[in-house]
Amino acid sequence: MSCRISEIVIDARDPERLARFWSDVLGFVELSREDGAVEIGPASGFGGPQPTLLFIPVAEPTPGKLRLHFDVNPTDGDQERELTRLLELGARPADVGQADSASWHVLADPEGNEFCLLRKRLDQV
């Protein structure tokens, strides 16, 4: 017996803004909205090989460093082109103590949630 991640739930001060940002980053579409929450995922919808992201509205700010973050990989370009695209979408560089020689870039989404852009390239699913 085993489990599979089907949804990742993220507290957000502005669910609309984060859903729009992450939809643009991942090529996802809006799947549903209810009571201020916005769910995004692949065009095939819920239950496919990729988990959906569900942004839930919360009033309070993040209480400190998150214990979980996303790593993303370019699927149709190189790391530097993808870095430029992510910065244009609203990501910003973040410093978590990584070395200057790190092969990844640490970024923050519009609400300051850290994520990493890796150099390894994956095929688009």
Image: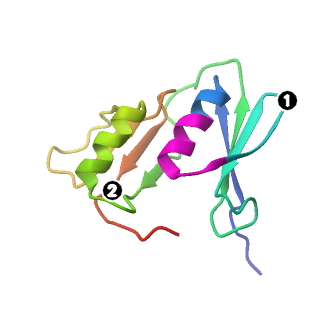
Taking the image as shown, residue 84 lies to the left or right of residue 20, namely left
Name which residue lies at 32% across and 37% down: 96
- What is the C-alpha distance between the residues marked 1 and 2? 34 Å
Crowd tier of the residue under label 2, counting other residues whose Cα lies within 10 Å: few below 14, some 14–19, many 20 or above: some
Q: Compare residues 7 and 18 and report the one nearer the observer.
A: 18
Q: Quadrant of residue 56?
A: top right
Residue under label 1, please give it: 35
Q: Residue furthest bottom?
A: 1
Taking the image as shown, residue 45 lies to the left or right of residue 61, namely right
Residue type at tag 1: Asp
Question: Is the stretch drawn in magenta largely helix, strand or loop?
Answer: helix
Taking the image as shown, residue 92 lies to the left or right of residue 8, namely left
Q: Which quarter of the rendered picture does the N terminus lie within? A: bottom right
Q: Looking at the picture, how far across and down is residue 76, in whole percent?
A: 36, 62
Q: Quadrant of residue 108?
A: top left
The range drawn in magenta is 19-29
How many labels, in total?
A: 2
Q: Residue furthest right?
A: 35
Taking the image as shown, residue 89 lies to the left or right of residue 93, namely right
Q: Which label sits on residue 118? A: 2
Q: Let me know if residue 9 is in the magenta part.
A: no
Q: Looking at the picture, how far across and down is residue 83, in whole percent?
A: 30, 44
Q: Is residue 67 visible?
A: no
Crowd tier of the residue under label 1, counting other residues whose Cα lies within 10 Å: few below 14, some 14–19, many 20 or above: few
Residue type at tag 2: Leu
Q: Residue furthest left?
A: 101
Q: Looking at the image, is mark 1 or mark 2 nearer the viewer?
A: 1
